[in-house]
Image: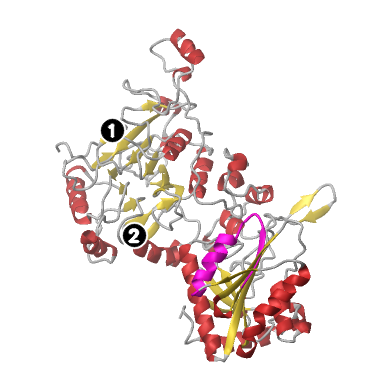
Amino acid sequence: MGRSGPVIHFYRSSFALSSVFSATVPVPVFIMSPPRILLCGDVFGRLNQLYKRVVSVNKSAGPFDVLLCVGQFFPDSTDQLDEFMDYVEGRSVIPLSTYFIGDYGVGAAKVLLASSKDSANQGFKMDGLKICANLHWLKGSGKFTLHGLSVAYLSGRCSSDGLPFGTYTQDDVDALRAIAEEPGVVDLVPTSDIPPGVSDLSGSDATISELVVEIKPRYHIAGTKGVFFAREPYSNVDAVHVTRFLGLASVGNKEKQKFIHAISPIPSSTMSAVEISMKPPNTTLSPYTLTERKSEASDSAKRSSNSVSESQYWRYEVSQKRQKYGTSDTNKLCFKFTSSGSCPRGEKCNFHHDMDAREQSQRGVCFDFLNKGKCERGPDCNFKHSFQNEFDSHSGKRRSGNAGTNRSKECWFCLSSPNIESHLIVSVGESFYCALAKGPLVPDHILVIPVEHFPNTLSLGPDYETEINRLQNCLRKYFKSQGKEVVFFEWVSKRSTHANLQAVPIPSSRAHVVQNIFDMAAEKLGFKFVISKSDAPSEGRKSLRTQFDSDHSFFYAELPECVTLSHVIEENEIFPAQFGREVLAGLLNMADKADWRNCAHSKEEETKMAEDFKIRFENFDPNK
C-alpha cells in the first residue's frame, strides 16, 4: 500500500465461533480473532481527510475494530472548525468507532464542555465520554478494556495553568501510577506527547517517561512531533515482555509522513507466559537510562553477550525532581496514596495523604465521594457512596469511618449527601448553587455554595471566579430592587468541610455604618482588618485572593461600595466561627438571632420560603 499504508501484524490463526452442537459430536476449538486497531497521529480537525483514508484502508485491509487518535485532535485554526463541527453535530458520518486523547485546539472547550454536561458522561468514567455517534473522548487519565486490550491513557499536555481541557493534572498522573501497581500487563498506552529519551527527537515531557517506565506497556503510541517513528522493541526492567514505541505524523502533513498505522495484537490477558516473554531479535535495552553505574557495568561485562541482563540497563529514576502542577492543594486527596497506601512524592506531594480515606477506599468507598463528597455517576457507580463503619476490637464498639477533617459524612452541602436539605436550594449553576440559609438571620439570607467539595471560594480557578462574580452581581441587583444592599462574607477555616459564601441583605439606610460595626467588633477581638477599596467587586475579590494563604484560616467580608475587609487568623488565635453573622445581627439589632439555631423553621415553612424566593428572584437568576 506504499509508505503511508498500514502494516498489520497477525500473531495467531483464528476461526469463526460456533456453539450449538450435540454433546456427543466432536466440537473444534475456536479462538477469537485479535482486535484490529488503527492508530493515528495529530488530526488537527482534518476529519474529511482522516476518514477518507480510514474508509480506504478499511476497504482494502479491514475490517478494523476501532481508531485511536493521539496528539492534537481539534483544529489548529478556525478555518478547519466548520468541517470538524459537521461531524460533531451529525451532518457528516464517522465511519469507525474513534477514541481520542488530544483534547485541545480550536473549539475544544466548547465541544468538551457540552459533552461533560451530558448525564451519560458524569462521574468517574474512564472508558470514554461520548461526544457524538462513534466519537469518544478519553479524559484525563484512566484504564479500560478496548476489544479485549488493556488500555491506560494520559490525555492532554503538561501544564501548570490548571486549564479544564487540554492539560493533565497531578491527580491524573497519580491515577496512572496506581494503575501501574495493579496486576496484569497493559497492552496500549496512548499519550499526546513523545517523551525524551525514546528517540533522537527532542522531547518535552519527562513525566511521560516516568509513567511509561512504571506501567511498562506492550505498545506506547504518541504524536505531536510531526514525524512517523517506529522504534525497535526494548526490554523493560522487572518485566519479561518488551515495549514497542510508535510515533505518528499529523494528518495531511506536507512531508507525506505516515499518519495512520495498523496493529493487531493479541490481548495479553489471553497470552501464555511463553508468548508474553518472547523477544524479537532486534530487541534493545531500555532507552530510559541515566548515567551508567561502574559496578553494574562491570557485572554486565561478565555475562553472556547473548542475554539481556537487568544490570545492563538502568531504571529511570522516578523519584527525581518532578514538576509541580499549580499551587499546593492539600484539601484534595492524593489518588496514589488513597489507592495504594504510598506516594513516591512523600511530603512534597501537592495533595492530601489521609489514612482514614485510605481505609475507606479499602472498604470499597468511591474515590470521587471521598475527594469531593459526591459522585456524579450515582447508582451507576460500582463503589459505595457512604462512609463504612468498622468494629473496634479494643473498645467493643462500632466506630464510624472518617475521611479526614475536611470530608465529614455530616456535610450538609454536598449534593450527594444524605444530609443535604434540597428543599432549600433555589438556583443551580455550572459550578455553584444557591440555597436559603438554615436558620436565616433575615429573610432572603442566601448561601452561595460550590457544587464540588471545595473548602473555600478564593482558591478556585478563573472559570469559577467568573461564575461567582456573576452570581454576586445578580444578587446585588435583586436586593437593590428591594431597596437593600448586601454583605457577603466567608469564614475559611483550615478545618472547614465545604465552602459557603453567605449573602445577607441589609437596609440601604444601614449601609453607611456597616464598616464601622465590623471595625469595632475586630477591635474587641484584638485585631484590625485589612481594608481595600476598588472600582469593581471583581477587583476586590482579586485582592482577597492575593492575601489568602491556605496554611491559615481566613475571614473576609465584601461590603457595599466595593469595600473589602480581610483578616488572616493566626494558629492560636481565638476567632468565632459565626463572627460575620454576629456582627450583622448587632448591626440589625437582632442579637438573639446571632445563633442560627434560634431561627429554626419547620420544613414546610422553609419550603415555602424557598419557593417564594425563587419567584421573586426569577428575573435576576443567571441560571434560568
- Residue drawn at (76%, 77%), measured in percent from left and top? 595
Amino acid type at circle 2 is Ala
Q: Which quadrant does the N terminus fall into?
A: top left
Left or right, 620 with reference to 370: left
Left or right, 490 with reference to 260: right
> Dot 2 corresponds to which residue?
108
Amino acid type at circle 1 is Ala
Magenta segment boundaries in residue numbering: 535-557
Give the quadrant of residue 520: bottom right
Asked whether the viewer can see residue 534, the reply is: yes
Asked whether the viewer can see residue 438, the reply is: no
Report if residue 536 lies within the magenta region: yes
Which is more foreground, mark 1 or mark 2?
2
Q: Return the x and y of residue 510 as percentages of the image width and height.
A: 65, 87
Q: Return the x and y of residue 169 as percentages of the image width and height.
A: 48, 50
Q: Return the x and y of residue 76 as percentages of the image width and height.
A: 26, 55
* Residue found at the far right of this picture: 395
Q: How crowded is the residue under tag 1: few (<14 C-alpha within 10 Å), some, or many (20+)?
A: few
Question: In the rendered image of this protein, does residue 31 appear above or below residue 512?
Answer: above
Question: In the rendered image of this protein, does residue 284 appear above or below residue 490?
Answer: above
Give the quadrant of residue 558: bottom right
Report if residue 551 lies within the magenta region: yes
Q: Which mark is residue 230?
A: 1
